[in-house]
Image (cartoon, rainbow, N blue to C red):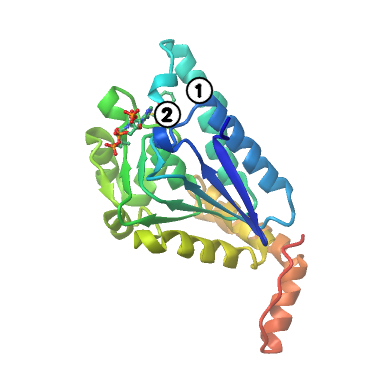
Amino acid sequence: MTSPVLVEPHEGWRRITLNRPDKLNAFTVELHEALAAALDEAAADESCRAVLLTGSGRAFCAGQDLEAIGDDPAGVKTLLTDHYNPLVRRIRALGKPVVCAVNGVAAGAGANVALACDIVLAGRRAKFIQAFAKIGLVPDSGGTWFLPRLVGEARARALALTGEPVSAEQAESWGMIWRAVDDDTLMAEAERLTAHLATQPTVALGLIKQAFGASAANTLDAQLDLEAELQLAACRTPDFAEGVAAFTAKRRAVFTGRP
Ligand code: LHQ
């Protein structure tokens, strides 16, 4: 049987590909389980310092597989509590950057899983669709949290209520994603970015994720305190010493990513 998730190791990073192209990489429990295992392995492997998430075929992900949903409302909630919510939490808690290459349509939970990633690149043919209301559902997988923060409440509400698609270029100009790029250069650009991040001070990058993760719920006072705490942790890493030494010697820093 073809694996619903492909993992391809590279020097310092790995590519994780959602792999149900005939169903536009829609989520099943099997896909969730394979993705959770792939992310946990990436987290545990010290030699992996960045992750690239993408989809195979013409789509990134069409959200929940609607043929595998069942008709028990309690089962729907369990899918969220047992699979989607842990997935979003895993991506946010991963102590290394996650780049998402949105290679085609990202609909429903597929769109929101993309938005959970740290840096999102999208090919120009990609679209982001809050498809939920079209089938009588509410946005999940963090959509009602990510969207207003990324694009403002007016756009977030309209997108969720209408289910209108957002093009990659519109998403970039609204600040929903980092960059829209040509489809035929998407993967090379995403790989270059991920490979670059994999050479950077990994512990500090993980702490940066932590700081942004906390900032939405923090007061400025609390965030200032947190920054001081995280800075202390960062400056205890060998990469900080290396960064300063390299700056002083006017040479390129060689970071190990080690704590
Ligand atoms: C699919 C799917 C799909 C199965 C395309 N399922 N087969 C969480 C937990 C619990 C409950 C519910 O929800 C959630 C979160 C969610 O994600 S809810 C939102 C679920 N997703 C959607 O509502 C999107 C449904 N898909 C679409 O609207 C379209 O397929 C999009 C706009 C994504 C792409 O349109 P097209 O490019 O025209 O492709 P297509 O519709 O022809 O799809 C190609 C094939 O993929 C087709 O299969 P077939 O055997 O006919 O070739 C579709 O049936 C299949 N497919 N999405 N979510």
Residue sitting farthest toward the top: 72
Quadrant housing residue 41 = top right
Provide residue 68's location: percent of width, then percent of height: 44, 20
Cβ of mark 2 under 8 A from ligand 1: yes
Q: Nearer the viewer, mark 1 or mark 2?
A: 2
Tag 1's secondary structure?
A: helix
Q: Are the residues at dot 1 and dot 2 in contact (C-beta closer than 8 Å)?
A: yes
Of pointers 1 and 2, the one earlier in the residue sequence: 2
Provide residue 212's location: percent of width, then percent of height: 53, 53
Residue drawn at 60 percent across, 30 percent down: 33
Provide residue 20's location: percent of width, then percent of height: 47, 35
Q: Nearer the viewer, residue 211 or 58?
A: 58
Q: Nearer the viewer, residue 67 or 148?
A: 67
Q: Would residue 253 be seen by someone viewing this image from the given angle?
A: yes
Cβ of mark 1 under 8 A from ligand 1: yes
Residue drawn at 47 percent across, 31 percent down: 27
Q: Amino acid at mark 2?
A: Gln
Which disc, if any, is residue 64?
Answer: 2
Residue drawn at 72 percent across, 60 percent down: 233
Quadrant housing residue 40 = top right
Is 165 situated left or right of 240 in this image? left
| Location of mark 1 (residue) | 79
Q: Amino acid at mark 1?
A: Leu
Mark 1 vs mark 2, CA separation in Å: 9 Å
Mark 2 nearby-residue class (10 Å; few <14, some 14–19, many ≥20):
some
Is 231 situated left or right of 174 in this image? right
